[in-house]
Image (spheres, helix red, strand yellow):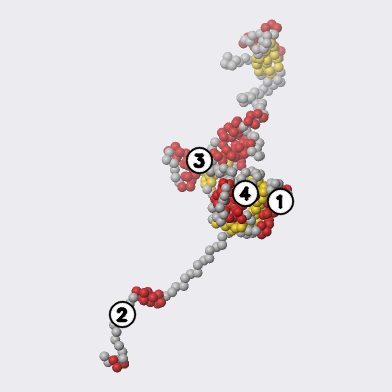
Amino acid sequence: MMLTEFSFEYTPRPAIKGQALADFVVECSARDESAPTAAEPTPAEWEIATDGSSCKQGACAGVILTSPEGLKVYYALSLSFSPTNNEAEYEAFIAGLRNARSLGARWVRIRTDSALVIGQVTGAFEAKGERFARYLDHALSVMGSFDASVAEHIPRAEYADADMLSRLSHEAPEYISKVARVEELPAACIDVMPVAPVAEDPEEWISDLRLYLQTGTLPKNDRRERKVKLRAPRFQMLDNRSYRRLYEGPLMRCLSKFEADLVMTELHSGLCSAHQGGRALARRIMLIGYYWPSIQLDCESLAKSCESCQLYARVPGRPATFYHPVSSAILFAKWGVDILGPFPQLTGRRRFITVAIDYFSKWIEAEPLATITFQQCARFLWQNVMSRFGVPVQLVTDNGK
């Protein structure tokens, strides 16, 4: 009341709206400086330039791959079939993507001078005809295997190298092989039947052992569990591969049945084959550094089933049994007697021959006989050995009598 002379007017305080309170909090609160966001790294992009041509001399294609570091790889494709010019462009386009994927590319930018191919791939043009629809599906499926792929249309003059490769592949093939990798395509990529990968048989001999060495898991079968525990100290895992330890040698890589068949076939009848026997082949494989439990039996079975080995192998001259050496230090002290026959009947009805050989000098005495009895052998030895050389003779039959 005392301030009324100064024209002060009293009014009650109005309600504070929620928006005003939010504005006050925003204005008065401390603002923390946000950390600068790190820029995403530029992907390692590969550039692919392709060009295909088809004429009366033949159909060829050229592919140039440029790595992120600037390294260029040249491919010259020889098409053994008869495609149209647009089909040749598609073949070059798909071959460039396939080669880039084999080199480990993940980000690709493919460029070609074919407006038809780029228009159909990007969706600007419609693929008319069954073959072009199949080419388009195949190209899109290959492009989908990359993390990112971009298709661009460029004039032919900007990538003259790819155009030159496609032209010189059939005009001067002997010079192209010196600057580019020459590949021959026997059939169109859409006509090749896809092959599905076959999974490895889980019941290999090394499966239980590998699982035990990696995770310590034992099989539920008692017999297999005992076998794994006995084998485990002789094996180890290295870079996700199984190896067998040797006492005085390097580690031997353990092979599955499929890998073992490939190694045996290549070493026995492959490019550097020698058509060795089972033991020699098994020894050679082990010296190279491969191992599986039945290596000896498998190599012997392969050598026996090889037609070339059965036709042209040398016949062994050794007998089926081992030799038993018999030594004699005195002349005519020990003799060997053998009976040969029966032969066609001679005079006196003689059909057998009794042969006595001295072990020391290899002296031979022989007499034809009609029948063979123990008394005749004794008489022969008495007349030809003891009476002539004065050597005592002792006869021993097969049964020791």
- Tag in front: 3 or 2: 2
Dot 4, how many residues are within 10 Å of its Cα: few (below 14), some (14-19), or many (20+)? many
User: Mark 3, mark 4: which one is toward the viewer?
Assistant: 4
Quadrant of res 265:
top right
Find disc 1 in the rendering and name its residue. Answer: 168
Q: Which mark is residue 14?
A: 2
Of the numbered discs 4 and 1, the one sitting upstream in the chain is: 4
At which x and y percent is residue 251?
57, 45
CA distance for labels 4 and 1: 19 Å
> Label 2 amino acid?
Pro
Indicate which disc residue 201 carries: 3
Q: Residues within 10 Å of mark 1 (few under 14, many from 20)?
A: some
Q: Classify mark 1: helix, strand or loop.
A: helix
Q: In the displayed structure, would residue 335 be above or below residue 5?
A: above
Q: Along the polypeptide, which appears first: circle 3 or circle 4?
A: 4
User: Could you say where residue 338 lies in the image, as x and y percent from the top left?
Assistant: 65, 16
Gap between marks 3 and 4, in whole Å? 40 Å
**193 vs 301: above or below:** below
Question: Taking 55 as reference, is 263 left or right?
Answer: left
Give amino acid for label 4.
Glu
Instruction: Give the number of the mark in front: 4 or 1.
Output: 4
Tag 2–tag 1 contact (CB < 8 Å) = no
Q: Are marks 1 and 3 in contact (CB under 8 Å)?
A: no
Can you say whether 90 is above or below 226 in the image? below
Q: Secondary structure at mark 3?
A: loop
Closer to us: 348 or 160: 160
